[in-house]
Amino acid sequence: MIQVERLTKYYGDVLAVDDLSFHVEKGEVVAFLGPNGAGKSTTMRMLTCYLAATKGTARIAGFSVVDDPVEVRRHIGYLPETVPLYREMRVTEFLNFRAKLKGVARSDRRKQIAECLELCDLSHMADRIIDTLSKGYRQRVGLAESLINDPEILILDEPTVGLDPNQIRLTRQVVKDLAEKHTVLLSTHILPEVEMVCERFMIIDQGRVVAMDTMDSLAHRSSTIVEVNGPPEQIERRLADIAGVEKVTCKKGENYHRFSLETTGANDVREDVAAALVGAGWTMRELHRQASSLEEVFVEATMKEAEDEDTSKQTLSTDVATTGEGEEQG
Amino acid sequence: MRNILAIFQREFVAYFLSPVAYVVTFVFLAVNNFGFFYIVGVLNNPEVGSVPPMQILLSSNIFLWIYLPVVAPVLTMKLLAEERRLGTIEVLMTAPVTEAQVVLGKYLASLAFYIVLWIPTLAYVAVLATYGSPDYGEFFAGYLGLITIGAVFLSIGLLASSLTRNQITAVILGLLPIFAIWWLPTILSSVGSLDPAVAKVVRFFDAIGHLQLDFSKGIIDTRRLVLYLSEIVLMLFITVRVVEISKGR
């Protein structure tokens, strides 16, 4: 339904989206995650043909965003992050105007508007002027607007930001209900929300996809943490040999080193780990298993780069310091 | 076409919901009232020979001279600048509409409101018709001139509105070219002797001159209409381009 091929966007010299490719199939609800400024909104704006891509292309419902922007827009409902609305209009007036623009036939408009109001729990606010509505209600007007022509694809940019807990639940429920017939791409910072609503997630950072998985396979992944005193390289090799362990990462300490073992499915490797370490005569002071959470995946995927950058900066500053000293001596 | 109509309707109705439009209408009618008062005064003065009333309105009413060019950018100032300031342009341009449809819809709405501004002045024609026998052809040409020149100013105002997020900036930006075709030719020809070739070019663009010398006498010169239409098309074309490239900035 959504096919993104090597999409790239520069704002002047600043690279916002870097060679991004992904697919979303019909009927999927996909979460689009990433830290602030990762390029989520920019990508969404390119998918809705609001921004032109610098390079690459995307196809929405089979239409190219480059060649057929109007046709693409006919198939999407889009809720921007800031939910811009015409404040001086009444709710139904606004929805009527948008329905007209989106080509809803005159005979269906009244019914369609009533349905959207009902779905977003707005029926009692239908005649209010949008300016007098609270933020949460305005957000719902925006959501109702994006549904007005019953689009196949919904692109929602942080739809639950600034809502009260009841409204958040309602919005989630709306998205869940829509998932039966629609394809949804939604960005958010609220990770539990993703676990509740989405089938698949995608994490981007600095304009690139850094992690992508289904919620099902995430639920089946777990990791085992162990802290051991001994020669780290040998321990790592020994741990990697244990059946069921996919990957071992090591964080070296002074005496004790912390190893994290990624395992698949229902494999519980704790007994094997204990046996192996004790057999080799290394002392162990911690051993536990934890299910992978989305938060962990998110932090791991997006922090790595930040750490790398920090180290490179440090090296740079040391270099500068050394040269400074050299000059003083000279 | 349906999209243009939808945008036209929204913008036209929006005029009646904004206080600015009522202020504009009030001052507009006040200025025209003064004009009418003046016309009746001249017509009642036995020492003045018979002067076409439209000519008096267009050449002697200094307030209209000042006010008319200001009305246009005030009417168009919010049309695109406000959309950009509030970010509603993002929602508008992600609906299945083209930039040209948006610009045309908004332009036609401003033109319709401008024409509505003139409608109450038809009462003066009715009054004149009651007490005398005016030449209706002259009125027709006069109104045509006022409306077509207004249409040019509105297209300039809309272009100015597309260039900024700030409505006041849009007005001032729009006034520069409007003054250039409204005041500048008069100023140029009164300050000194122009080179005849230059003077000829200036006369082509002299909107006040067109009103005084042609339209107010009942002359409909197609050269003027073609010029105005070309100016409008050019302005709207540039506006469409500006909207295209300024999305997302």
Image (tube, coloured by chain):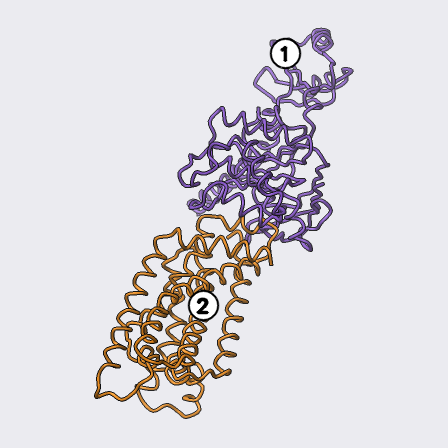
When the figure is inspected, residue A194 is found, relative to residue B138, above or below; the finding is above
* Residue in the foreground of this view, choosing between A18 and A303: A18
Identified by mark 2, the residue type is: Ile
Instruction: Please give the label number shown on residue B38.
Output: none
Instruction: Please give the label number shown on residue B156.
Output: 2
Which hue belongs to chain B? orange
When the figure is inspected, residue A309 is found, relative to residue B192, above or below; the finding is above
**Number of residues whose C-alpha sits closer than 10 Å to that of mark 2, classed few (under 14), some (14–19) or many (20 or more):** many
Which hue belongs to chain A? purple
Chain that bears disc 1: A
* Residue in the foreground of this view, choosing between B62 and A289: B62
Residue B217, percent from left and from top: 39, 84
Instruction: Please give the label number shown on residue A288.
Output: 1
Identified by mark 1, the residue type is: His
Q: Residue at x 55, y 37 (%)?
A: A144
> Disc 2, disc 1: CB below 8 Å?
no
When the figure is inspected, residue B85 is found, relative to residue A269, above or below; the finding is below
Chain that bears disc 2: B
Residue B123, percent from left and from top: 34, 68
* Element type where label 1 sits in the image: strand
In the rendered image, residues at marks 2 and 1 fall on the same chain: no
Residue A75, percent from left and from top: 66, 45
Residue B187, percent from left and from top: 32, 82
The quarter holding residue B170 reads bottom left
